[in-house]
Amino acid sequence: MTSASLLSVNVGLPKNVSWNGKTVFTGVWKEQVDGPVMARRLNLDGDGQGDTAGHGGEQRAVFVYQIESYHHWEQHFGRDDFVYGQFGENLTVDGLPDDEVCIGDRYRIGEAEFEVTQPRVTCYRVGLRMGEPELPALLVAHHRPGFYFRVITEGRVEAGDAIVKTRTGPGALSVADTDALLYLPHRDLDGVRRALKIPALSPGWQGSFRELLEADATGAGTFTAAGTSGATPPAWEGFRALRVTDVVTETPTVSSIRLAATDGIDLPAARPGQYLTFRLPDAGQPVPVRSYSLSSTPGTGSYRISVKHEPHGIASGYLTSRLRPGAVLEVAAPRGEFVLEDGTEPVVLVSAGIGVTPVMAMLHALAAARSTREIWWIYTARGPAEHPLAAEANDVLGTLPHAHEHVYYSSSGGRLTKEKLVDLALPVDATAYICGPVAFMADMREALTAVGIERIHTELFSALPSTNPGIVNQTLRPPHQPAELGTGPLVTFARSGLSTPGGEGSLLDLADACDVPTRFSCRTGVCQTCVTPLLSGEVAYSPTPLESPPDGQVLICCSRPTTDLVLDM
């Protein structure tokens, strides 16, 4: 490696920036500093980060970018207006290219010593700063991400300081190669294993790499930069016709509906805990799209859902009051990651109200397998009249040799509380599954965590919580039509109960305009945080994502509808 030097020290405190009608709190704007600056354990004096979940901290105290990459991007974009700190970096350097610097390398600059911990995190805010929205994807595709330093020895640094390598990291894994292992397809798993042997690699990247290896070893799913997803492709694409074979009243407000294939062939087995999505043109206009958990034994060749008639519920009212055997419904294939896992450890099934349905399917699966696992069935409702499938659950539990049943009715003073759950002395090595109202699930998760249970899964049928890094001062509004209706294909956000024509922007732009809760980070098809189940329809990508999503999924940040489509969001 040729000699290297520090060209500029750049700092900046976070500030509010207007962007796409929203406010972003970000520290990506950095300005050059004259004279020495103290490098401390968490950052440089005068510097700060707006989103500490993705930036900053001991492992990401100082960000480094190279003047050679400046020249590359000047040529790529045809620009000549760059200034030091343009890419959000603290240290602009001459030398230290990403394809030569390795994780764990150490360097002395002025009085301070630093260690390389990870590449840049892909984030839309660098594109915001540059006025180049596609830049996060380009940084990865062009192998020029830049990297973070951890401060080993605090001290002053100043423009003009020489950069001296003091130690070579183990593993000889460059920043560019590390970045590619996480964000690009056709990963070298041996390279991932080598990365995990480097102590200096930040814990966040170590966790992502461990998930990658686990997904490969177990075949449990497709690994993306955002985690493991898409365990198996859906059993069929889009919606297919299923015939109603039976409608059974379970309680005054809950009915079970049995479904079979119109051709009499057995339906594909669902995993216990999954749900079906229905498009119901006979229920009203615009056509409602709703999801309901399967409540039956998996693998019987037919499906059963149990639906509660919600007040003013167009879809649930149609299914529970007007539906008759022989009717044909449009149904998307079973989906969902809230599923019973194989194992021998105890199982805790906790539900409230109609949240009983997915855990009932899990209970049936355990009984069908003649499970000898310890099983705790914990259920709460207002009273016996609001307890669907009560006798069925009791009968199934009677076939399991190590089952415990606890039912709580709030109308008679038996409301399930965190304290009562703690008093049950549940086994701490159990895996727990919770389904019910959002507040109930939050309380039960807190209680289960308090007793020492770590493996806890929850099901949420409303729109998933947003992941919008850096966005502040958001006013929470129910999903609604956008201010300006598009002229493209109809887009249905199934969980949000909203259908609207597509516009000129991406599906993510459309969701933002409708206040549909969204999840994103890069907004350019790199990190895959926005990956969303595509229930029906087709999309086109622009820009093309660096890695295609799993089958049956779509990256909403860089896709546009080419046909009417339904998204599970």
Image (tube, rainbow, N blue to C red):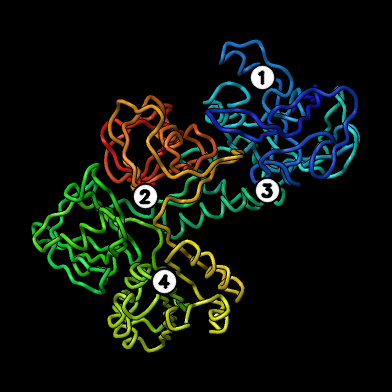
Which residue was labeled with disc 2? 495
User: Residue 33, relative to residue 468: is it above or below?
Assistant: above
User: Residue 222, relative to residue 28: is it above or below?
Assistant: below
Task: State the residue at coordinates (31%, 62%).
Answer: 293
| 3 or 4: mark nearer the eye | 4
Instruction: Determine the secondary structure under disc 4.
Output: strand
* Dot 2 amino acid type: Arg
In the shown orientation, is residue 532 left or right of residue 184? left
Instruction: Determine the secondary structure under disc 1.
Output: helix
Identify the mark nearer the N-term, 3 or 4: 3
Q: CA distance from mark 2 to mark 4?
A: 20 Å
Q: Position of residue 228 (x, y in %)?
A: 47, 52
Identify the mark nearer the N-term, 3 or 1: 1
* Label number found at residue 202: 3
User: Residue 122, relative to residue 5: is it above or below?
Assistant: below
Identify the mark nearer the N-term, 4 or 1: 1
Q: Position of residue 404 (x, y in %)?
A: 43, 86
Residue 128 visible (yes or no): yes
| 2 or 1: mark nearer the eye | 2
Picture quarter containing residue 408?
A: bottom left
Which residue was labeled with disc 4? 352
In the shown orientation, is residue 212 left or right of residue 254? right
| 4 or 1: mark nearer the eye | 4
Residue 141 visible (yes or no): no
Instruction: Determine the secondary structure under disc 2.
Output: loop
Which residue was labeled with disc 1? 70
